[in-house]
Amino acid sequence: MDETDPDKRRRAIAELEHYRQSFTDKSYFFVIGASGNYYFNDASNAYAGNQYRYTLDPNNPRDGWYYNTAALGQGCHLNVDNDDTLRVTKVWMNCVIREGRKVLGILGTGIDLSAFIREVVNVPQVGVVAMFVDHNGAVQAHRDQNLVDYHSLTREMTDRKTVFAMLDRPDDAIVLQTMMNEVSAGNALVKSQFMQIGGKSVLVGVGYLDKLGWYNVTLMDIDTIIDKRLFLPVGLLLAAMMALVALVITLVFKRQVVDRVGRLEAAVDLARGGDYAAAAALADDRQDEIGRLSTAFVQMAKAVGQHTQELEARVRARTEELERLAFKDGQTGIANRRGFMAIYQELPRDRAHGLLLVDIDRFKTINDTYGHAAGDVVVQEIARRIQLASGLGNHCARWGGDEFVVVLVDSAPAALRAMAYGLTAQVCEAPVTLPDGRPVMVTISVGACIAEAGETLETTTDMADAALYMAKEQGRNKVVIFDSDTASIDKARLGIV
């Protein structure tokens, strides 16, 4: 997302190189969608320091694999590709990288199947030719490299080198297509039929490798293999043998490659959904390409799973910290109004509680005389003294600017009165010392009331506020307890009859 940042670019290349060492193929490719830049390095580390190779072009048919995969929008996809430059065949794992629904690029590595395919197609038997073709009949592997269609992903159908082009008769092409459809549909493992190729009658056998989407096509020239003078049963026996060979090739390839790649693909799908534990069951002790790839994936999934758990734990801790900060006054460290309201909601509703509203007298004069920094020091010190004087089991908070609130849990009138006067004495017993050493005498006014069982916080604070108002009316540095007389005076003040 920030490819031009040199530090991020350096760190990203280092991360890719770290994973390259774990990949079985010791190679990776990485395409960034915004720029189309293609990064690559191989097992020989030939591109160290120069991993950027080129920029993809939407108009270049050879780059069509990227845009087709990106259009899928998500997931990891297996793609078989023949490289006509390197003369290798690889199964590529292309993983779409995205943020939300936006595709950012594609990352992947490969498994080299060239050696295996050479062993299959280089059949030493005279008169027998084996090949692999795709759904369109394009030749993917053949002992004659000139017959391989190395651009089957991007070439137009009319330009492809196909198995159908080897047939002499159009009707045989239809029959071969039908055979391919039947084995791919699962109606039969292998189908065979005599067809005309190069002026000769050739027995053609077809098997299907579903995970790769390839067909194994075997051609047997009966005239070359056996003498025509031999009896027909021998020919039938050879036909059966050919079918058996095609079946064995299909089953061996399916078991050794396709099934194991399928299990790996399933584990990748689960990992994409966050289930990294499922990768542990993928352990493969065989020391071939796929076995080493599976082992590397298991190790990677375990590491990613562990990092994910650590990240989730950090997110939870940070969220809890932010929630705590949301209920705490940043200047004084005690609860803020929101925090106090949450505390009050948790108090037993069937009991009476005492409430004190505390206001610093003439706080504006302090700010004007000593400065706002001094005013902040006064607020912090008064908050500390109120918290200390509130005692265990009770709660205090900053209600607003220079106003504080204290709730006395499960209180009674006598205890409320004693706490109100005791708190006033402790808060005002000594001046507040400013950072420059100057003392400031601070007094407070207190309005108190008893919140009867079931009364809301709004009702309780209204009563305490009325008492606080009277304390200030009487000259400040006073304590007023809200009772029936106070209520009458408050109604008269508000013009209520």
Image (spheres, rainbow, N blue to C red):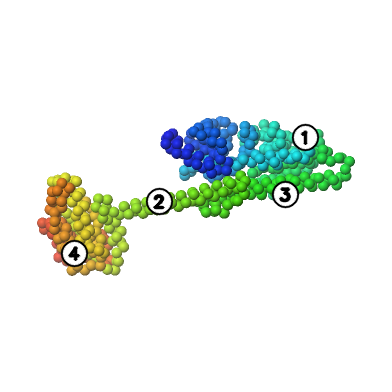
User: Which tag is nearer the camera, tag 1 or tag 4?
Assistant: 4
Q: Left or right: where does residue 270 sit relative to residue 230?
A: left
Q: CA distance from mark 2 to mark 3?
A: 54 Å
User: Which tag is nearer the camera, tag 2 or tag 1?
Assistant: 2
The reply to whether callout 4 and callout 3 are in contact (CB within 8 Å) is no
The reply to whether callout 1 and callout 3 are in contact (CB within 8 Å) is no
**On residue 419, which mark appears?**
4
Q: CA distance from mark 2 to mark 1?
A: 68 Å
In x, y percent, where is residue 104? 49, 39
Residue lying furthest left: 475
Which kind of residue does numbered mark 2 sit on? Val
Q: CA distance from mark 1 to mark 3?
A: 26 Å
Which kind of residue does numbered mark 3 sit on? Ala
Q: CA distance from mark 2 to mark 4?
A: 42 Å
The residue labelled by disc 1 is 168
Residue in view at x 11 percent, y 58 percent: 474
Height in image: 320 above or below 391? above
The reply to whether callout 2 and callout 1 are in contact (CB within 8 Å) is no
Q: CA distance from mark 1 to mark 4?
A: 109 Å
The residue labelled by disc 2 is 315
Q: Earlier in the sequence, mark 2 or mark 3?
A: 3
Which kind of residue does numbered mark 4 sit on? Met
Structural crowding at the residue carrying mark 2, measured as other residues with C-alpha within 10 Å and reported as few (<14), some (14–19) or many (≥20): few
Name the image quarter holding residue 139: top right
Residue in view at x 69 percent, y 45 percent: 208
Q: Secondary structure at mark 3?
A: loop
Q: Earlier in the sequence, mark 4 or mark 3?
A: 3
Q: Looking at this view, is 248 or 412 the one in front? A: 248
Q: CA distance from mark 4 to mark 3?
A: 92 Å
Q: Left or right: where does residue 437 sit relative to residue 349?
A: left
Q: Looking at this view, is 137 or 106 the one in front? A: 106
